[in-house]
Image (cartoon, helix red, strand yellow):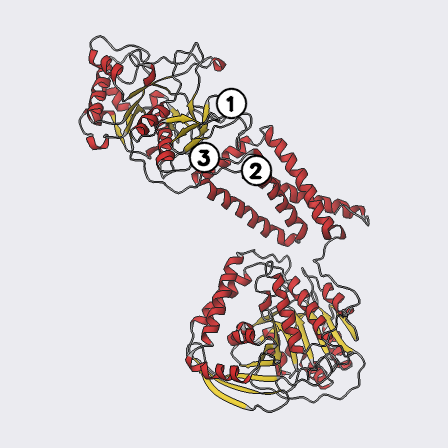
Amino acid sequence: MPLTSSGAVFVGKLVVLKLGDGSFEQGFPATLQIGDEKHHPSLEITGKLPPAPDIPQHYSKWANAYRGLGMRYRLEAKAGFVTNVSKVENCSTGAQALSVRLNAWLRTESFYPLREKLLEQLMPSDEVRIIIQTENILLRRLPWHLWDICDRYPKAEIALSAPIYERVEPTTQTKTKVKILAILGNSTGIDTQADRLLLEHLPDAQISFLVEPQRQELTEELWRQGWDILFFAGHSSSHHNGETGRIYINQTDSLTIDQLKYALKKAVERGLKIAIFNSCDGLGLARNLADLNIPQIIVMREPVPDRVSQEFLKYFLEAFASGESFYLAVREAREKLQGLEDQFPCATWLPMICQNPAIAPPTWHDLGGKHRSNTTEVPIFDSPIEIEPRKPQILRGKRGLLGVFCLSLVATFLLMAVRQLGMLQSLELQAFDHLMRTRKAEANDSRLLVVKITEADIQAQDKESRRGASLSDASLAKLLQLLESYQPRAIGLDVFRDFPVAAEYPELAKLLQTSDRLIAVCKVSNPNNDDPGVSSPPEVPKENLGFADVVPDPDSVIRRHLLAMTPPPVSPCTASYALSSQLAFRYLAAEGILPKFTSKGELQLGKTIFERLSANTGGYQNIDAAGYQIMLNYRSGRSPENFAPQVTLSEVLEGKLNPNAVKDRIVVVGVTAIRGKDYFFTPNSKSIKGDEFYHKMPGVVIHAQMVSQIISAVLDERPLLWVWPEWGEALWIWGWSMTGGIIFWRFQSWQRTGLVVVALGSLYGFCAGLITQGGWIPLVPAVLVLLFTGSSVVTYIAFQSQRQKSKFFF
């Protein structure tokens, strides 16, 4: 019976809730008894819990999420057992849903009179034992500690009981110490030595340890003398839906409680009062132990992580040996586990009491320990005991974290140096292309129209004088006259014409000279590769010219968009702006948006600033960033080549083009025939094979993509591609270096694979998500530095352990 700090007897309340035969489909009859400890109930009331077929579904959803977390459980041992790490969010969501539904069930109208009697009869200061009596296994699995009654009464704790029980009168013995039989069973993959350390520091206790005993050895020890507490740590499991339990006593043998029945019955007769099974999935164990009338049993209702089981034992022993009642010691220890729930979700759900209602729980003093006031500030253990995962001494404490910090800095510095040398550029660009291909399809840009000059179009003009060009003067004249009559905002002619109009087409020459919509192209010379360039059409004024130059990367892929440049003095092409820039400027001018430059010399259209690409931007290292370059954010889709409406030259000349498809739009005319060889690789190209045109994109479509990028960024706020500054990328890479170091430092080898997979999956998901917003952040360097730092930590640990020094870097 509990004592106050002055030693006076404090009478608590005993509440028994009996849930009879029933089901979640039909409901359960309920009987509530309330009385004082060691007295017959003074009140009894009946009611019913109504049908709730969804509660098993809520429990199953939570249990699957919890068991999928892949933590270091004390479940049945398996050689090389590795679990998968799942999402913590699913477990938390399932736990919340189950808690809400359980409390709603316990507030239903048919159960309401029982709830009201509880609130009427109990005081917040009462120490209350609430016993749930039921045979239904799923009722026993529910988290009854989440019943809001427990929040109203801070000294209440819930236990389970079988409907049938019997009081066994033990032999009377005078004791000066608490006698504990501690069985340390199969410990494959877990740390039962932490449990032993806690028990060894327990005051007023006489402890016998059986480490991975044989069956006969264990049975004989149970028969040999009277025990107060039976303790088991190791692997265990429940079977047949929680009907039976099994403990794994050594590397090869396991036992059911029934196989220890006679020895345990004798132990109860000789005074065994408490059984603690600090192992997994203990409901089956509790059910079998209750049949033997063991007075008090503590088990874990679900698979329990190794660290949680150790911390619970520490908290419980501290409270119980300090003078707390058995029930309050369990509640205090259970609630202290909340501090671990950031690492081990639902840790507070796991410990539970199974009670023989005929026998009151003993105190530590009743078992033979010295009486201690539960208000004393003197620690129970001779010295503080910190439980940490087993690992080499060089990994413990702040020095370990400092070592990881230093190794991560070194790894980051080396990675950044390798990156600056351009050794990762190819991998980073390939990763960029992959991320670009993962984006969802975008709507087509109807502000543009692409007029394709196909192979058939060129063949149809063979009778006309083309002078080597893809468009004859006759076809060009007819095309421009038709397009002009449809009133587009701008026409881009992506066809080289470095010769004058023939004398018999004076109207074409006049149109080229006077049209304020037409932009023709030329090509700037490049002395570095002996490219002489291509002149512009002689009739077109300079202000109506745009260069057609593009800037392929070393792997021949077009990822950059050249907006403007200063041509060499000797270049036959003197255009300062690209064809795409000129077309976009004219389209936006009709919207009242004119180009201007910021104080930093960056192009601004409306509110949009086009940040210049530098020689060391993002995954680029030491590239040629001459001229005004930005990244090219292709409009994605199932077929990026068809991102805008397209027609052929023949369709236009034959009058098949709807004038409304041209009015107020940008028309880009260019060659798509293979003989034109105006094809380029893009991030959407899936294979690059020599000079093949498979998966390449026509130049005219690339120019149209560039035009679309400019006007979409200004009018639609479609994101431009951007990167972090170099210092931001360095911090990002260092963060993943620390992540890899901590994973390999803090966790066991069997856990690392799952955690690394989760980390890399999160990294990939973040990069893929950010690319949809235009953000290109380092993926390949982050992956490499995470793995490199982790392997460095492991290598360092192995090296230092081999040297067997007493002081280490960690």
Q: Secondary structure at mark 1?
A: loop
Q: Which quadrant would residue 691 be assigned to in this image?
A: top left
Which residue is drawn at the image coordinates 43% and 9% (left, top)? 570
Residue 498 vertical placement versus 457 (above, below): above
Q: Amino acid at mark 3?
A: Leu
Where residue 808 appears, as percent x and y from the top left, is 78, 47
Nearer the observer: mark 2 or 3; the answer is 2
Q: Which quadrant would residue 643 be assigned to in this image?
A: top left
First along the sequence among labels 2 and 1: 1
Nearer the observer: mark 2 or 1; the answer is 2
Q: Quadrant of the N terminus?
A: bottom right
User: What residue would you read off at disc 1?
Assistant: 624
Task: Check residue 721 in the rendering and tell me which mark sits there, or answer none.
Answer: 3
Where residue 600 appears, as percent x and y from the top left, is 48, 26
Q: CA distance from mark 2 to mark 3?
A: 16 Å
Q: Residues within 10 Å of mark 3 (few under 14, many from 20)?
A: some
Is residue 464 something that shows in the picture?
no
Which residue is drawn at the image coordinates 59% and 84% (left, top)? 14
User: What residue would you read off at disc 2?
Assistant: 728
First along the sequence among labels 1 and 3: 1
Q: Secondary structure at mark 2?
A: helix
